[in-house]
Image (cartoon, helix red, strand yellow):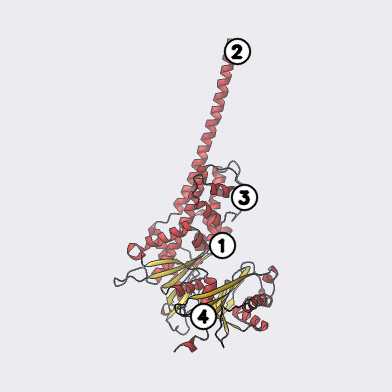
């Protein structure tokens, strides 16, 4: 009996030792995996670093490219397009004005009643319409006839709150968010369609002329007085509210900037000098690139896999279309090389663009003690049902790295514009108030990004200057801004001037 007991004890001890060995081995393996995961994220963070010295080099490079783009067509990665807007709203505009905003599969029609000096926007209304898929690949006449029919229906519903001055024609600002070569304030040739549209007989045509012909066919008495880019519209809306607004930045799905330039500083401008001596420039800054940008292997891979490799590099670092995708790509590497989510990589994690920036933002802003929002996003989007708090914290840290880099690099671009305008220094001991209108869902809704952007602009400018430079949220440049530009370029303005 004693021998049996001893034997049983030995077997039991061996079993315990074996179990302990398995547990120790598993813990060692988990520790090794975690160490590898941390190393990947740490290396990524180091490559994303944006010290102030580096950001100032990015700002300088932006300024150099701005000069080159103004000197000649094709002289820079920045197109620096002449907008033909030389008459921004002043706040004195009065009357009823319309805007048509065609930028994708939906379009908007709106009207505003302006009250003149101190009156502001008295009233506004809008409607949104979906474009039937068959019209996106049909003929030019079919598309513009459909748009004008909806526009005419909207005009027919004008109520007593909207008063057209007797004897005047209705005027419209037309936001057309497709590649256009503009030739005057109210004309521009379509270079190519994007966003799923493919209508061959519109390419090479003046889109304002196409819209006007459709109005004539419909019997709608309305004149297009401004063809507008949404970024220029944001600048117009900002200027209407505050006369110190000199630039606008869009930070949404995509990104762009526009600013007011002295006509004499635009060598490629060969027309008559604008009356005010200034011209709004649409930078198309998303296409900026520089060796000083903190790009990583993930950015290079994203670019190579994109529809436009080698293009829009700046936009791919700072805008909402791409931030979530960069997070996904790093997570995918961590899953592959460190078995972060187990021995197999979750299939959904391999799907490009499945992790959208709004989801990334929600995880980044998660303040719950157990990071429940992060857990839910992993489960709902990536079908990862179990995750430890430690894992969720690492994911939040990863979101922070990507958002911080994007916001700080965007801030460097803003400094580049201020440098080009000569507003990055104090002149003659006097501080000049400078306001930049900012719009876009990324800026508006991703609060950590917004705060980081504003703090970095202040950091770059220094304490002496930062309190005279303001970033203000300006809403709906493509709508209200377009209507305001229709007003500031009205055919009746000269007749009203004393």
Give coordinates of residue 303: x percent, y percent.
55, 59
Q: Secondary structure at mark 4?
A: helix
Q: Nearer the viewer, residue 73 or 195?
A: 195
Disc nearest the viewer among 4 and 3? 4
State which tag comes first along the sequence, 1 or 2: 2
Which residue is denoted by mark 2 in the rendering? 4
Q: Nearer the viewer, residue 311 or 261?
A: 261
Which residue is denoted by mark 1 in the rendering? 309
Which residue is denoted by mark 3 in the rendering? 348
Disc nearest the viewer among 3 and 1? 3
Give coordinates of residue 210: x percent, y percent.
63, 80
Looking at the image, can residue 63 be seen? no
Q: Which mark is residue 487?
A: 4
Asked if residue 201 lies left or right of residue 261, the reply is: right
Disc nearest the viewer among 4 and 2? 4
Residue at 58% from the left image edge and 41% from the top image edge: 342
| Quarter of the C terminus within the rendering | bottom left
């Amino acid at each position: 009996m004693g021998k049996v007991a001893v034997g049983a004890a030995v077997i039991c001890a061996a079993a315990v030792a074996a179990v302990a060995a398995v547990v120790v081995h598993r813990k060692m393996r988990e520790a090794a995996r975690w160490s590898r995961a941390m190393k990947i994220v740490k290396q990524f963070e180091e490559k994303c670093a944006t010290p102030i010295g580096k950001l100032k080099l990015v700002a300088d490079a932006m300024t150099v490219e701005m000069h080159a783009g103004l000197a000649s067509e094709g002289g820079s990665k920045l197109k620096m397009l002449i907008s033909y807007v030389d008459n921004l709203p002043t706040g004195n505009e009065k009357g009823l004005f319309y805007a048509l905003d065609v930028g994708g599969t939906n379009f908007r029609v709106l009207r505003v009643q302006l009250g003149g000096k101190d009156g502001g926007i008295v009233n506004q209304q809008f409607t949104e319409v979906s474009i039937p898929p068959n019209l996106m690949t049909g003929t030019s006449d079919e598309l513009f006839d459909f748009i004008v029919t909806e526009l005419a229906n909207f005009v027919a519903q004008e109520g007593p709150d909207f008063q057209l001055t007797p004897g005047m024609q209705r005027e419209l600002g037309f936001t057309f968010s497709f590649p256009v070569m503009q030739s005057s304030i109210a004309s521009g040739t379509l270079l190519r369609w994007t966003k799923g549209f493919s209508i061959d007989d519109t390419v090479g045509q003046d889109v304002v002329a196409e819209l006007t012909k459709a109005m004539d066919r419909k019997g709608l008495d309305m004149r297009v007085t401004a063809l507008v880019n949404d970024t220029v519209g944001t600048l117009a809306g900002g200027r209407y509210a505050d006369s110190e607004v000199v630039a606008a930045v869009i930070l949404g799905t995509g990104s762009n900037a526009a600013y007011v330039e002295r006509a004499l500083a635009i060598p490629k401008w060969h027309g008559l000098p604008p009356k005010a001596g200034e011209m709004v420039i649409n930078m198309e800054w998303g296409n900026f690139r520089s060796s000083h940008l903190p790009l990583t292997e993930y950015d290079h891979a994203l670019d190579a896999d994109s529809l436009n490799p080698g293009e829009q590099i700046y936009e791919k670092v700072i805008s909402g279309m791409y931030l979530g995708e960069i997070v996904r790509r790093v997570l995918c590497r961590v899953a592959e090389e460190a078995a972060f989510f187990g021995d197999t990589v979750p299939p959904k994690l391999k799907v490009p663009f499945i992790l959208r920036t709004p989801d990334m933002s929600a995880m980044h802003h998660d303040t719950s003690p157990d990071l429940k929002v992060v857990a839910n996003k992993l489960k709902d989007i990536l079908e990862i049902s179990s995750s430890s708090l430690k894992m969720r914290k690492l994911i939040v840290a990863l979101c922070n790295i990507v958002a911080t880099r994007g916001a700080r690099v965007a801030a460097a671009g803003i400094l580049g514009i201020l440098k080009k305008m000569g507003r990055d220094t104090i002149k003659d001991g006097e501080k000049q108030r400078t306001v930049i209108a900012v719009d876009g869902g990324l800026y508006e809704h991703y609060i950590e990004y917004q705060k980081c952007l504003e703090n970095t602009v202040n950091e770059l400018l220094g304490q002496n200057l930062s309190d005279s430079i303001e970033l203000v949220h300006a809403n709906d440049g493509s709508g209200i801004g377009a209507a305001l530009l229709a007003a500031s370029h009205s055919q009746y303005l000269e007749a009203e001037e004393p």
